[in-house]
Amino acid sequence: MKTVALNNGVEIPILGFGTFQITDSEQAETAVQEAIKAGYRHIDTAQSYMNEEAVGRGIAKSGVPREELFITTKVWVENVSYEGVLASFERSLKRLGLDYIDLLLIHQPFADVYGAWRAMEELQKQGKIRAIGVSNFAVDKAVDLAEFNTVTPQVNQIEINPFQQQAKNIAALKAEGIMPEAWAPFAEGKNDIFHNAILVKIGEKYGKSVAQVITRWLVEQDIIVLAKSVKPERMQENLNVFDFALTDADKQEIATLNEGESQFFSHADPEMIRWMASRKMGV
Ligand SMILES: NC(=O)c1ccc[n+]([C@@H]2O[C@H](COP(=O)([O-])OP(=O)(O)OC[C@H]3O[C@@H](n4cnc5c(N)ncnc54)[C@H](OP(=O)(O)O)[C@@H]3O)[C@@H](O)[C@H]2O)c1
């Protein structure tokens, strides 16, 4: 699996397996085992996905040595404070059955992100986390965190897909040394993405599916791709993107699909911020 180097030298596999919305415990455990069997070495979970225990069981049962795996989890909003990170990180470790995390992210750009960041810097210094980062941060907020702290976030995990391409934001993050990760690369199937005429046509040229075209388009930009599927054949399909390349003409066509806005919601919407603040999950 191709890896890319984060700003502290840690290597991260460019394709990661997403576990959002796999809430059924048995299904999550099986999906993680199947994903590792298919070839994934990078698993993405979060406190709020309510599946850290099942993901941990899948990891343990995979039989792959811990040091060959790259595991990410994310701190939910109610834990975004200095004390909240220290306490909830230990709970996440316990649920996952691990003694270190490869990447810990602040899941949403709300609450006491500065306090949380200081705790994450300390945990990283103690060797309990290899890389630290943020998620859903607007570029200005990510750069602010970078410039006024010791550690520049290694990652910002944001929505990136053909309808929300974020080219300007990706360039700005990279200029700051922050690696973008793409969540919902397939827009969770919204906007009929798997039947999009341009993506289908490009795929037909190479004998590849829409999912493979999108994944390849992101890999060629050196963006880490997190894709979720509970189906083993789709896991294999989503990993099989290293035997073809897109042309400039293909990329120009994909560029025309950009709508320049989220397929889901805006993190700047006050209603959404109130909803996030109210979402106490006890994690
Ligand atoms: N930081 C954040 O706020 C945030 C937000 C959202 C997601 N994420 C992370 O990013 C990961 C990926 O995003 P996502 O799960 O939201 O959406 P996604 O990966 O864009 O889409 C997943 C959907 O696509 C289907 N699918 C997957 N591969 C396919 C293929 N080859 N052909 C046809 N359909 C396919 C899946 O169905 P089946 O499962 O039935 O195959 C599922 O319905 C998440 O799992 C999570 O780890 C992070």
Image: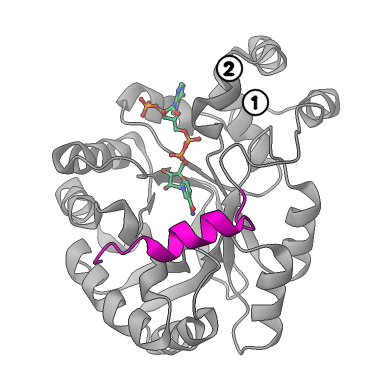
For label 2, the crowd category at 10 Å Cα-Cα, with few meaning under 14, some 14 to 19 and many 20 or more, is some
Residue 59 highlighted magenta (yes or no): no
* Residue carrying label 1: 244
Mark 1 Cβ inside 8 Å of ligand 1: no
What residue is drawn where x is 73% and y is 62%? 174
Q: Foreground residue, 32 or 79?
A: 79
Q: SS at mark 2?
A: loop
Mark 2 → mark 1, Cα distance in angstroms: 9 Å
Assess whether mark 1 and mark 2 are in contact (beta carbons under 8 angstroms): yes
Q: Position of residue 203 (x, y in %)?
A: 64, 16
Q: Is residue 212 above or below residue 70?
A: above
Q: Where is residue 197 in the image (x, y as percent from the top left)?
A: 69, 11
Q: SS at mark 1?
A: loop
What residue is drawn where x is 34% and y is 69%? 101
Does residue 183 appear left or right of residue 262 in this picture?
left
Q: Is residue 148 visible?
A: yes
Kind of residue sitting beneath label 2 = Lys
Q: Which segment did they paint magenta?
A: 266-283
* Image quadrant, ligand 1: top left
* Residue carrying label 2: 208
Does residue 126 appear left or right of residue 8 in this picture?
left
Q: Quadrant of the C terminus?
A: bottom left
Q: Foreground residue, 276 or 220?
A: 276
What residue is drawn where x is 49% and y is 61%? 274
> For residue 97, what is the image quadrant?
bottom left
Does residue 57 appear left or right of residue 191 in this picture?
left
